[in-house]
Amino acid sequence: MASGNDSTLSLLQGTLDLLILQALAWGQMHGYGISRLIRERTNEVLLVEDAALYQALHRLERKGCIEAEWGVSDNNRRAKYSSLTTAGRRVLRREADEFRRYVGAIFAVLDPA
């Protein structure tokens, strides 16, 4: 999820699945592309460990949220490309709404009006 240095954050349980689903909402990607997108979009605050990423991808595929197919990457290597299913889009909408409510509640405590 994140490296151990002070400039990165550990992901809350379940957050990685949400981030993967959101990454795939922008289009089909292989694991390294998903990891790179998360790292770049968070200015390297969130660094996803390979093992956690691939466990999450397998879990999401078993749940029917994503589907995968083998292809060739930009550097001519065989790679497994994942894409969001219709069910995955529904899960993404629901989970994103729940996460926004959760974060709002946390900020209500951290930054009371």
Image: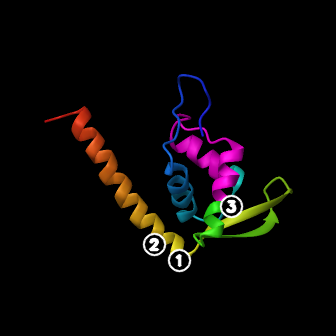
* Helix, strand or loop: magenta stretch: helix
Name the element at disc 1: helix
Number of the label disc, if any, that sits on residue 58: 3
Q: Residue at x 51, y 59 (%)?
A: 22
Q: Amino acid at mark 3?
A: His
Along the viewing direction, whichever of 11 and 31 lies nearer the viewer: 11
Instruction: Check residue 45 for magenta coloring.
Output: yes
Q: Residue at x 55, y 38 (%)?
A: 46
Residue, far bottom: 86
Q: Amino acid at mark 2?
A: Arg
Along the viewing direction, whichever of 4 and 83 lies nearer the viewer: 4
Residue, far left: 113
Number of the label disc, if any, that sits on residue 90: 2
Number of the label disc, if any, that sits on residue 32: none
Q: Which residues are magenta?
A: 33-57
The x, y position of residue 21, in whole percent, is: 54, 61
What's the CA distance linking mark 1 and mark 3? 17 Å
